[in-house]
Image: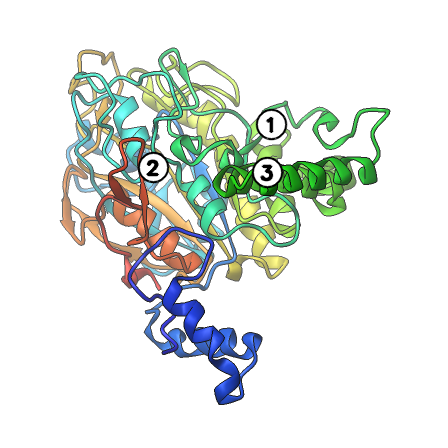
Amino acid sequence: MFSIHGAAGRMCDTASRRELLTVGGLSLIGLSLPTFLRQRTVQAAPTLGVGRGTAESVILVYLQGSPSHIDLYDPKPSAPAEIRGEFQPIATRAPGLFLGEVLPLLAEQAQHFTLIRSMSVKPKGLRNHGSAIYMLMTGTDPANFSSTGLAVPPSRDDLPSVGSIVARQRPSVSSGLSYVAVCGPVKEGKEIGVGQSAGILGAAYDPFTMYDDPTQPLKLEAFALPGDITLDRLQSRVDLRANIDRQRDSARTAATFDTYYERALGLVQSHRAVQAFRLNEESDAMRDRYGRTRFGQSCLLARRLVEAGTRFVQVTWPARSDDEPVPGPDGSWDTHRNNFPTLREHRCPYYDRTLSGLIADLAERGLLEKTLVVAVGEFGRSPKIGVATTDNVGPGGRDHWPECYSCLIAGGGVRPGQVYGESDRFGAWPKSNPVHPFDLITTIYHALGIDAATEYHDSLNRPRRLVEQGQPVLGLF
C-alpha cells in the first residue's frame, strides 16, 4: 500500500487514481495525510541503494573543448615519450593517486575528490564536439544532429538537459532558482546553447542564465520589478490569470502558465536568490582564492548559489568548444597544437586555482557532503602526440579522443581519495570499469534521489526515459 514509486517512473505532479483512493481511506486506519507521506518515504528508503539521495545540489563544471586526460588526471610515466608527453606525475594528498605536474593545488585537495579514469563514449557521426556534448548534456543520443556529428540550432523539439530534468524532478524549495547556468553558454561551431535548455519540457525549466563577466559587478535587473509594479500587484495578476484559466477548464495550460509565473514571482520575492549574485559581499581574500577570472568568479558564484538553495548550477568554461586556443585565462581546451605550453602557461594555472579553491571552500563550509561537484569535458585528447584522429592536428597537439578520458567527481556522498576505473598503459582505452556519459548522468540523478527510469513523452508522443540507458556507478559511493 505504501509503495512510493507505484508503476515505475511517471513524470507527473499528481497522485495516481489508486493512490488517491488509498489516501481517501486513510481515516479508516487512523492516519493523516502527512503521516501517510512520511511513512511512504521511510518505507522506500531501504530500497533506494547505495548513495541515493545523498546530494542536495549539483555543480557541473563543464570544460568545453576537453582537456587532455593524460596530462591532467591520468599520467603515463612509463609510456613512450610521444604518449607520456612533457609533464611529470606528482603525488597528492590521497595515497596512490597521482596527477600531472600542472595541477599542484588540486593535488593538495585530492583527499576530497575521486577520479574516474575510464570514461568512454562513441558519439554519433565523426569525432566532433557537437554530438558528444549533446550526449553529455542530455543523456540521450543526438538523433537530430547532422551525419558528421555537428551541432544544429537548439529548438523546443530538443530533449531536456540534465539541469532541466533536475529542475523538474527536484525543484528548489527555498530560493526560487532550481537551475542556473553561469560563466558562458555551451557553444559548438556557430550554435549556442547546445543541450542546455529544457527543450520539450518548456521554458519553465530552462536555466536562469548569468553570463555577465563576474569579475565586474553583475547586473541584477532580472530580479527587479518595473517601476509602477508592486509585488502585491504582480501577485494579483498571477491570481487573476489562474482564475481565468480555471474557468476555461484548461487545466493543462493553466498548469504550464502557473509553473512559469509562480517561479518567476518566487524569484523576484526571494531575497536569498538575489543575494547570491552579490559577489562584492565576499572578502578580497576569498575572491583571490578562486582567481579573478571569469571562470574563477563563476565558481565562487556557484558556491553562493548552492548556499542559497539552488539545486543545479552549471559552470561552463567560457571558450567555445572548437575555438583555437589563445593565451590568457579564457581560451579553449581544444589543443590540436601546442598542447603543452597552452596547458602549462594558460589553461591549468587558472583551472587548478579555481577548482581546488571551490572544493576546499565547500569542504570547509560543510557543504561538500551535500553538494556533488562534477568536472568533465565532452571527451579526452589523443594519447599519441601530433597524430590526427580527425583532420586537424598540428605540432605538439593532441586530437579528439572519446574512447577514454577522465572525470573529477567530489562530494554528494562520493567516497573521496580514490580512483574508479583504469585506462590501459597508453590511456587509450578503458582497462576496467568503463563509464559511459549516460552512466555518469544516471549517477548524478541517483545522488539526487531521482529515478532515471522516470518517463516523459517527446514531441512525437513517444515515451522517453530521463536517461536513454545506463546505470549509476555505485562503486563511487
Q: Quadrant of the N terminus?
A: bottom left
Mark 1 or mark 2, earlier in chain: 2
- Image quarter of residue 428: top left
x, y percentage for residue 202? Answer: 46, 33
Q: Position of residue 358 (x, y in %)?
A: 56, 46
For badge 1, the amino acid type reads Thr
**Sequence-earlier tag: 1 or 3:** 3
CA–CA distance in space, label 3 to label 2:
32 Å
Image position, residue 89 (x, y; %): 32, 43
Q: Amino acid at mark 3?
A: Asp
Q: Which mark is residue 382?
A: none
The structure residue drawn at horizontal position 34% and vertical position 59%, both measured from the top left corner, is 418
Whether residue 283 is visible, yes or no, is no
Question: SS of the residue at dot 1?
Answer: loop
Q: Which SS class for mark 3?
A: helix
- The circle on residue 293 is 1
Mark 3 or mark 2: whose residue is earlier in sequence: 2
Mark 1 vs mark 3, CA separation in Å: 47 Å
Label 3 neighbourhood size at 10 Å, few (<14), some (14-19), many (20+)?
A: some
Q: Please say if 259 is above or below 297.
A: below
Circle 1/circle 3 CB separation < 8 Å: no
Q: How is the image coloured?
A: rainbow
Residue at horizontal 39 percent and vertical 77 percent from the top: 2
Which residue is the site of mark 3?
A: 245
Q: Is residue 93 above or below residue 148?
A: below
* Residue behind mark 2: 138
Choose between 258 and 452: the one closer to the eye.
258
Q: Is residue 387 above or below residue 24?
A: above
